[in-house]
Amino acid sequence: MEGLEGLDNPDIGALDEAKEEVEEAIAGEPMGSDKPAKGARQHLGEDVVESFAKRHSLYMLIVAVAAVFIIGIFLRTTMLHFQGFFEPDGFYHYAVMLQAVHNGFAIPLVNKLSGSPTHYPVTEPAGLYYVTLIPYYFLRFAGLSVYDIERGMPVLFGLLDIAATYFIVKRMVNNNYVAVLAMALVAASGGDIARTAALVYRGDGFITIFLLVALLFIFEALRIDDAHDRRKYYYIIAAVAVLGIGTVVWNGAPFTIVVYMLAMLFLVVYGFVKANRALLRDATIMSAALIVTYIIQHIWMSLYFIRGSQAFSSWHFFLFYLPVTIGAALAYYVVEKRNSNAILTLLAGNMKSRIYLFAFAAFVFIAIISAVFYSYLVGIAGGGGLVTAHSTLTKSIQELTPPTYGFLWASFNLELFLAPFTLLFYVLFTGHYSLLPMVGTLIGILLFAAMVLYRKRVFTAKHSDEYFIIILAYFAATMYLQANAVRFNSLVAVPIAILSAMSLYTMGRFVYDRRMVLYNKFKMVNLYYALVFIAVVLIVYYTYLGSSTFAQADGIDQSFLNATVWMRNNTPSNATFLTIWPDGSVIEGWGNRTSLTDSVGGQNGALIAGFADFLFNDSVDTQYLYSVGKPDYILARPYWFTLSGGIAEEGSVNTTGFGLQVMNALPPIYNSTTNTNYYEFISSNIKSLLIMHIAANGTKSIGAYIGAPNGTSYDPINRVLFYNEQSGAFAFSNISDKYVNYTLFVPYISNSSGVSISSGILLGPKLLNSNFFKLVMLCTDASACPYDNRNVTLTPVYVNPDARIYKVTYLNSS
């Protein structure tokens, strides 16, 4: 296929040029030359042309692959100018790794900076830390630190994802063009970048490469038809061993087992319907071999490299393993004996009967297993809280919320419409029946149908149908996870990129095969290339727009890090700090001080509940400070206003009267005639309106109102609290005590173009009397701190726009 054979085939124009040059050179040789005879010289010329074509194709491939890697690196390193890490997890892991370095590179059982006097256990598997510590062990002599390697390691794994994608697709379609295209889509995937960007240190960013390598081994095993070839079984063992090794880098790694089992199930169904004995034999062996993954997982657990239990580490594994393996063996037996057994001939003698038999068996099996193990299946489907929230502690975690269409667009943009069924999963599992997802679903169904109907022209490699089925299983499992929670966008990024590349290639094959009946074959093929190029450029551009605006999560900024540096330099090494759990991890990792109650590594629901009760108490509640071990310092941040709802939910606090409605600001409206600014804030539960008017004589007036999100009427509220996020200054504007007793909290940033307001927070009457408000807003002046009590006093020792550190003085012994 011209061009679409891509980098596998020579450039036709370049071949013609080279051939002409060679023929001219041969024709111009003088008589009596020592060169070969004319016929031999013509043969030599053809060899030269072929050699030139191969070199030309190779150079093109090298340039294309290099360009993809450069794009991948560029999009993953936009946050390197920040200090520290992307989110609290990275700071926590940094603290653990520093302790490991001082402990002979053995991962500690507890993080000595998390909790006091009892320290919380390190629950992440050891492999997550050795991903950095093993390279550090060898590279420390070159001047690299744990900090340097931890920040950059995710980028390396992103590049490994890109490289593995090339080999996966190359094996599927035997076409460099499609393989490089899939690489480019992974390189520019916002979903993959979400976990493989510099500063993002998460186990789900490291696990993808283990699954891709395992799938490559499975592809190689399927490629070998000879059942007596030992290499087939070496590849199978290598695949399941890689999956087993992967369980030591992330507690969520057993999702790879689900992908593997689902792939085997799909292969069994396909092989049974097609009566493919060889495939059913291979699927049976590959299914049975998964026990090796289970054994390796338990070896890690016995060595305490895996802390605690993971999914599929108990008998739940066999609830899925045995049916798939036994089902594969039975399917093989039925197909093998269908012509020699009358009953089997009747039940499975032709494709139609085999489809009916499979449907009946599947129905009976699902009915039985659902009736007996329903609660276990529900728990597994929810991932034990890793997929769907099941407790007050996990319900407030934003990563466990279902994705919005906007989130999916930010993660995959154009690939949403190119990868078949991507938006279908989103519609099914979120019930979001808006126009664009429905249109995307329709496009996906059409693309999938085109791929299936046109597969003989698209999938030209041997066993490509089986490869495609495996990728579909990979996509289905990970897209289910993505449809339930935003945290899994990195897991589904690779199969979405592969299927998107396949869709684009299917379109190209269609155009090429019908080029003779089209208006102008050359223009149509060139138009296809132009459209593909534009699509890739747009994907890279949209991803760059997102990655270039990345900021550290959970309110981590330079001011907060400066506060933790101050505590590291100005407080005793054994000082304990009381704060919320995400900030506790930053204190441990950057401040090298102990977070008293909690951190990422020890999310203790009881401790969170106690601290939440303390914050939302309108009494000083000094007994709480004594009961949790008398913390030496308290760290509070205005950023907590945006987390107030989550803090209350995690602590099961009755927030009646506290307000706590976080709203997004709509673009402001300015009326030049009346010199009035209108700011509207809205959430799913409520909306608010802020009106700021400047009269002709310079007099300023302010009005604030609340109303239903879809309503047109408003009720005035008592006051507005303005907060300058840059300076930390705040000012109350009391409107009238006669109005509804709520306060509109408005954080803002001043810049050269004016005032920027991105959110508003509605505060109820109780919040202004709570310890939360006192710590965050009122106690920055020691002489006016309303918290001082005969049992405890607070003294501000460090204040900046982002953080307040209070020294706690205890006036009684108990």
Image: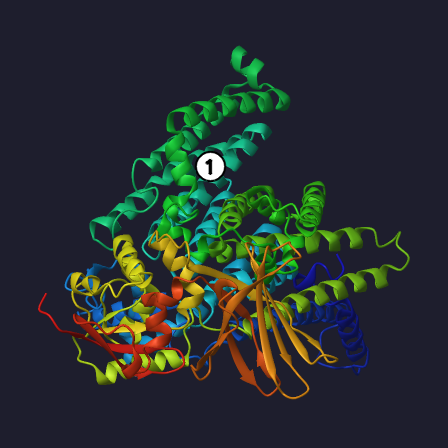
Q: How many numbered discs sit on the rendered protein?
A: 1
Residue 15 in sight from this viewpoint: yes
Looking at the picture, tell me which residue is in the foreground, 138 or 389: 389
Q: The residue under label 1 is which amino acid type? A: Asp
Q: Quadrant of the N terminus?
A: bottom right
Looking at the picture, tell me which residue is in the foreground, 504 or 115: 115
| Residue sitting at the far left | 813
Which residue corresponds to the image point at 38% horizontal and 47% vertical from the top-left?
385
Q: Is residue 144 above or below residue 346?
A: below
| Residue sitting at the far front | 738
Q: Is residue 594 above or below residue 324?
A: below
Residue 463 in sight from this viewpoint: no
Q: Is residue 110 above or below residue 445?
A: below
Q: Quadrant of residue 790?
A: bottom left
Q: Quadrant of residue 669?
A: bottom right
| Residue sitting at the far top | 342
Q: Is residue 96 left or right of residue 346?
A: left
Q: Element at badge 1?
A: helix
Q: Is residue 341 left or right of residue 32?
A: left
Looking at the picture, tell me which residue is in the foreground, 264 or 768: 768
Residue 143 placement (x, y as % from top left):
31, 84
Pointer 1: what residue? Answer: 282
Residue 356 placement (x, y as % from top left):
59, 21
Which residue corresponds to the image point at 36% horizontal and 74% vertical from the top-left?
149
